[in-house]
Amino acid sequence: MPIRILIADDHHVVRQGLHMFLGSDPELEIIGEAQDGAEAVKLAQELHPDVVLMDILMPVMDGIQATAAIRQSLPDTEVIALTSVLGDNSVIDAVRAGAIGYLLKDTDANELRRAIKAAAAGKVQLSPEVAARLMREVRTPTETRESLTDREIEVLKLLGQGKSNRDISQALFIGEQTVKTHVSHILDKLGVPSRTQAALYAIRSGLVVPD
């Protein structure tokens, strides 16, 4: 099954460009386009995409608000934030809202495809520099990991190491759907909206040491 993608950007030429070079990949399928954040939320709830490419600056509702709304109502849909300028505040706000990734709009097409496929697989990708910055600025849970089961701690550790759902399922000899269920429980117990923030918690609590 191809990865189902919703594009949200207020510039038609950007949406058209994304549609053109993503549509050429047989593993990807563009299922909808939105020209503002409110429309992105509406279409996401109707279409249930695997990944949303979300512009940050849009009318009616901005990409940060739309990301938070989508993550709250559709926990299985991952959001990649797209920005014109990769400023610290936009990155931090996107992660706080629940985005699993963030890219500049001039990102190489192949890199964007890889990022989409990684997001769809539930793979958190943080460089040590980005992880350090986010750990200083983004709130992580105050709760201790005692609320997590032993299995959930195993899943969280692998998630924090940047493993995909498939990698985790193979490492723990469980099904991918079971992995998704464990991740959902982890996010609920830690009170965070995204795998990225769960990964930050894994690093901060000492479960994972960044490379």
Image (cartoon, rainbow, N blue to C red):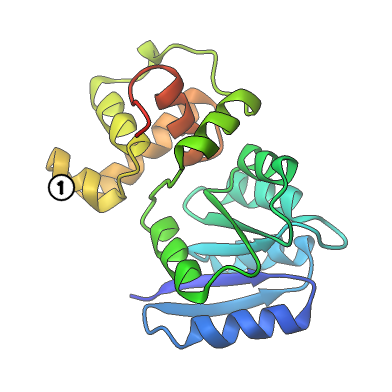
Could you tell me residue 193's position as x and y percent? 56, 37
Q: Give how far across and how far down residue 80 sits, in percent.
A: 57, 57
**Residue 13 left/right relative to 148:** right
Residue 24 to residue 71: above or below: below
Residue 21 lies, with reference to residue 211, above or below; the image says below
- Relative placement, left or right, of 208 versus 201 is left
Residue 120 sits in which quadrant? bottom left
The crowding category of the residue bearing disc 1, from other C-alpha atoms within 10 Å (few below 14, some 14 to 19, many at least 20), is few
Classify 131 as above or below 176.
above
Residue 185 percent coordinates (x, y) = 40, 32
**Residue pointed to by mark 1:** 170
Residue farthest toward the right in the current orientation of the protein: 60
What element does badge 1 sit on?
helix
Identified at 24% across, 53% down, the residue is: 166
Determine the residue positioned at 57% across, 55% down: 79
Q: How many marks?
A: 1
At a point 64% along the width and 37% down the height, the residue shown is 96
Up/down of 22 relative to 153, above or below: below
Q: Residue furthest left?
A: 173
Q: Amino acid at mark 1?
A: Gln
Instruction: Report the quarter where the C terminus lies.
Output: top left
Q: Position of residue 15 (x, y in %)?
A: 68, 79
For the point 51% across and 75% down, which residue is it? 109
Q: Nearer the viewer, residue 203 or 46?
A: 203
**On the rendered image, what quadrant is the N terminus found in?**
bottom left
